[in-house]
Amino acid sequence: MPTQTHTFAWGLVKSIRAAGCPVHLVSAAPASTFPRNRKILFRPGRFQQDGVQGDLLGFVNLLGVKHLTRFLSAVRSGRRALRRQGSDVLLIHGVHTPFLWFGVLAARRRWVRVVPVLTDPPGVALPTDGRIVRGLRRLDRALVRSALRRSSGVVVLTAALADDFAPSVPRLVMEGIFNPPSVDPSTSTAIGSVDAASEASPSSAKIGPTRALVYAGGLTRAYGVDRLVEAFRGLTAPDLRLFLFGRGELEDWLETQAKSDPRVVPPELLNRDALVKRLARAALLVNPRPVGQSFVRYSFPSKIIEYLSTGVPVVTTRLPGIPPDYERYLLFADSDTVEGLREAMLRALALPPEASRALGAAGAAFVRETRGPAAQGQRIRSFLAGLTTISPDQDDVRAQQRKLPRHEVGRR
């Protein structure tokens, strides 16, 4: 399961509910297409999670058939849910064609505003895709664009997503939501201090406490992980350790790097609660994503919000999707090269302890106060109220009169 997509989805639900909007979910299991996921038949059902009720869509997990059966399930279950809930707005999380076109159909058949939430561009080709799959992705992109033009509005991570895929549709640019984890990072040990005997490689136990530099995310060249490792190896301080949490194509390469430099710790995959604790105990958190790739203009790395929330200083490349109001809380690399990353990490590590603590605390307060569910939920509510041409106060009155929930969220 794509962890950050899953986290954002529940952050979206939590934000809408925090703004006083009831939510009902119509959802499909986020399974990769067979044979990457060996399960073929997913059965429909009901579920309840975190106080939210929902309908689970059934589908056949085969190429081509998956889209068709998801669309038919969405029509059957989604129409029933819309009728039962009396919703004003249908939010569709993601650019999944079956759900978008169900939204188009729903908007035509009944009074409901359809608002897709775009976190990624549609139909991104993968290096492993063959000719047939690439052709299907091109068709999918065309269908997505057509559906988006028929939407009432869009919520997007970056303005570029709206500019390129829904240029004439009202938009709300919302780069992310801080969805608090179930653990509080403040209960962790002192920031910046790591017990080498328990956290690092066996050979490092001889030198006692260390300063941890941490990256969490996809372990791929596309995300600049190879550059980060090369930059780190140019740092000479013996008490530094580099921790990398995640999975990806570079796992074997990273194991080799760890053998040649004991300060590089072999990669590890953690659940979110455990990861947040480890992030909070770091001396520095790093986002090395290169800035020159085509997808970057559509992207805001959700790890920036997660990093800042821990109160630890953050070094990042200058990605175009980072809003200006983040800049005072981040330490930017002058370039996304190995040398640029190394210089930025040296500059961050040289900060006096009081300056480092102040920067981290300011960043944590910023994301918790301005990107948390309460703040982002009010932004979403105001945007949706504008699309329905009803003020939030009038909307409350009408909802009380009807005594029916107002919002329904469909997500992949």
Image (cartoon, rainbow, N blue to C red):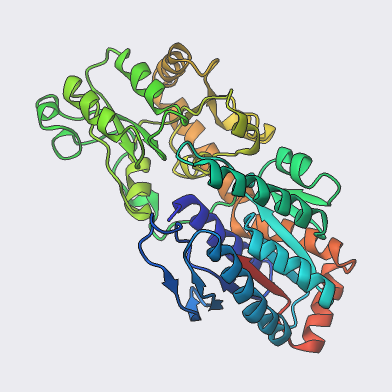
Relative to the observer, which residue lies in front, 379 or 352? 379
Displayed quadrant of residue 389: bottom right
Displayed quadrant of residue 298: top right
Relative to the observer, which residue lies in front, 211 or 72? 72
Q: From this viewpoint, which residue is outermost toward the right?
A: 389
- Can residue 20 be seen here? The reply is yes
Q: How many marks?
A: 0
Residue 111 position (above or below residue 143): below
The residue depicted at 13 percent of the width and 24 percent of the height is 207
In the drawing, does residue 82 fall left or right of residue 250?
Answer: right
Quadrant location of the C terminus? bottom right
Residue 245 position (above or below residue 355): below
In the drawing, does residue 103 fall left or right of residue 214?
Answer: right
The residue depicted at 40 percent of the width and 28 percent of the height is 225
Q: Position of residue 233 (x, y in %)?
A: 30, 16
In the drawing, does residue 295 fall left or right of residue 388?
Answer: left
Q: Position of residue 78 (x, y in %)?
A: 66, 77
The residue depicted at 62 percent of the width and 58 percent of the height is 96
Relative to the observer, which residue lies in front, 340 or 353? 340
Q: Position of residue 259 (x, y in %)?
A: 17, 25
Relative to the observer, which residue lies in front, 400 or 407? 407
Residue 92 position (above or below residue 43): above
Residue 6 position (above or below residue 89): above
Quadrant location of the N terminus? bottom left
The residue depicted at 35 percent of the width and 62 percent of the height is 38
- Can residue 179 be seen here? The reply is no
Q: From this viewpoint, which residue is outermost toward the front?
A: 132
In the drawing, does residue 389 fall left or right of residue 8?
Answer: right
Q: Position of residue 133 (x, y in %)?
A: 54, 47
